[in-house]
Image (cartoon, grey):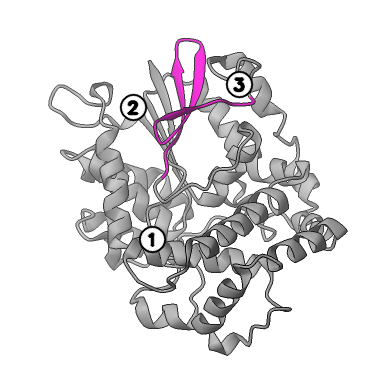
Amino acid sequence: MSQLYMGIIHGARSPNKYTDKDATMWKIQAGQLTERGFQQVMSLGEEYQDKRLFDKDGNCIYEKIHIVSSVKERCILSTIAFIKGLCPKNYENILERLFREYFNIFAKDKQLLEAIIESKFTNPFLFDYSQFKKKPDFLFHGHDSSTCPKLQEVEDKLINSIEYEEKIRYFKEKQAFEEVYRMMVDASPSKNFTKENITLAQIKTFYGGFKCNEYEGFNFPDPSQAAVDLMKEVYLYQFYDVHNSQMLQHQSSLTEIFQWIINELNEDVPLSWYSGHDSNQIAILAVLVKFRLQPPFATALEFRVKGDYVNLYYNNAKLNTLMCDTEINCTKDQVIRYLSKYIAQDLNKLCQI
């Protein structure tokens, strides 16, 4: 059996955008991996130890593991955590090669790169990973209009539609909206929110921050279940219907990801690791399954390959997929044909770069 493992989502982090209240609770910068998030992914690495990855002395064999990672701080740290969990005996050697052969390409400060390697990864939180840059980055940020400017035009058309206006009205007429509005006002008095000017995008961001706070053990906000359900519904609507519903969005987000997956399906490697973001995983799920999932931190989305057959797993649960008529046990050829539908021949032309 060979296994293509996609550890799409980094571990738990602080909110990407702090509310006024968040800024008083969190002691790290917005969007950074937490110590708990690091341990999350390290534990995940331990779960994926496999005798095929090790030599007779219990050391990981670098060539048996293919790794690509976003250069965002939380993803680099999650990659370090995963390797430390996966390769406890020789993670220093594996990570040194990874930083010299992969991250070196994106390092703008070579002295920093050497300092990270010389630290032997004993305390990776000490370093400023913002010095790593990759542009354009369709492999991890194809969903972003800064990568693909044409996306803004597509999204503007969606949010200016009659259907979107009706959806705003639908959400704001729900009884729980009053509670969500009050929480957002209490969280950020400086924003001068009104019921009329609050957007669905802001509710989505607020819900994302709430999930970060909840995981870290902060008791703010403290919503009712009805308010949580409303925010989650908005979150899923924004992610799936606004950001991942049009072919151009799919192609911009998925072209390089699916090219990478197809390449790995044709490789004889026990373990392939993609360290990315929830946006990446939702973009994939949007075209592979019929239902809508909200991936938690450190979610494992896997293409498990056995012989000529491929199955999709989400946190160890087998999913029915759209990749073949049988929905499970799809052949490699069926998977490759399906994924290829979302691969653009020229991303620069597609995105008008």
Mark 1 vs 2, N-terminal side: 2
* Circle 2 residue: 64
Q: Are marks 2 and 3 in contact (CB under 8 Å)?
A: no
Is residue 159 among what the camera can see? no
* Circle 1 residue: 110
Is residue 254 among what the camera can see? yes
Mark 2 vs 3, N-terminal side: 2
* Circle 3 residue: 335
Residue 173: quarter of image: bottom right
Q: Which mark is residue 302?
A: none
Residue 318 within the magenta-colored segment of the rendering: yes
Q: Amino acid at mark 3?
A: Val
Q: Are marks 1 and 2 in contact (CB under 8 Å)?
A: no
Q: What span is colored magenta in the figure? A: 299-322
Q: Secondary structure at mark 2?
A: helix
* 88 and 28: which is toward the camera: 28
Crowd band around label 2 with a 10 angstrom C-alpha radius: few (<14), some (14–19), many (20+) = some
Closer to the observer: label 1 or label 2?
Answer: 2
